[in-house]
Amino acid sequence: MAKTLLTAVSLDDTDAGPGAMTQAELDRALDLHHVYLKRRSEGARACFKLMDLSGLDLSGRDLSHIDLSGACLVGSLLRGSRLSGADLFAADLRGANLEHAEFYRADLRGACLRAARVNDALFVEADLRGGPINSRYRDDDAESDAASFAPARKSGGFVLQTDLSGATLRNARFVRANLSFCILSGADLSGADFTEANLTGANLEGAVLTGATLTYADLRATNLTDATVDGAEL
């Protein structure tokens, strides 16, 4: 049985376990997805909802409009992949390599990217707000399991906050992205571009924003305690 959305997985747990997808199975599914993107009838949109893809290689692939909601991608490789319009709602991307990846208009609500490498990635118009788990995922153990995903209580359930704490995001582009209440504490955001981004209530405590661009960014209630802002365009 595949690991579910809220199963806690350590950064060292990247070997395929029982029920986890193999690299060969993944490659076959992604080949069909590539054909699907070409609008050919023999293709099929890849759906890995709640699947365990930890430690697998998805780098350099066109993953546009793929469904990775709730998927476990701990330590996976997505370097240079295109994820435009992809569904990564509550996906677990801890320690993943996302450098040079493209997330144009992707749904990253409630995703966990702690300690991920995301240098030079593109998040233009991406949605990185918190995501309600009660409306899309019904799990009797959600309350206890959600602890590893920085949840916030809300009437009727929990909201998973998008967590990029400790991530390396040098030169990443967040133009017009929605990062309201996103956790970016301790993240390296040197040279990042937040032009017109929504950072309302975001936690940037201890983050490095050296040379970052925040022109017209919404910084209402943003926590910049101990953040390094040398040379940043505010």
Image (spheres, rainbow, N blue to C red):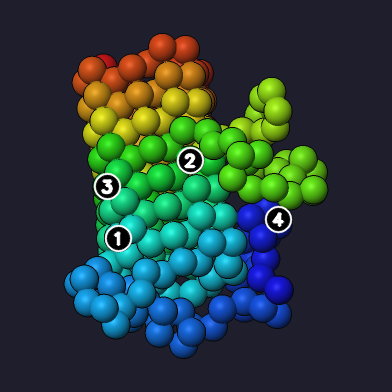
Q: Mark 3, residues whose alpha carbon is within 10 Å: few (<14), some, or many (≥20)?
A: many
Q: Position of residue 230 (x, y in %)?
A: 31, 24
User: Does residue 55 appear left or right of residue 233 in this picture?
Assistant: right
Name the residue type under label 3: Tyr
Given residues 186 and 201, the one toward you in this image is 201
Which residue is rendered at x = 33% and y = 17% of the image?
A: 218
Can residue 60 be seen in the rendering of this structure? no
Q: Amino acid at mark 2?
A: Arg
Q: Is residue 121 above or below residue 225?
A: below
**Which label sits on residue 64?**
1
Give the residue at mark 3: 104
Residue 105 visible? The answer is yes
Q: Amino acid at mark 1?
A: Ser
Of mark 2 and mark 4, the one earlier in the sequence is 4
> What residue is drawn where x is 44% and y is 60%?
67
Q: Amino acid at mark 4?
A: Ala
The mark closer to the camera, 3 or 4, is 3
Write down the residue under mark 4.
Answer: 8
**For the residue carrying disc 4, how many other residues have a C-alpha within 10 Å: few (<14), some (14-19), or many (20+)?**
some
Q: Nearer the viewer, residue 176 or 138?
A: 138
- The image shows residue 163 at horizontal and vertical percentages of 53, 40
Crowding near the residue tagged with mark 2, few <14, some 14–19, many ≥20 C-alpha atoms within 10 Å: many
Name, please, the residue furthest toward the top. Answer: 220
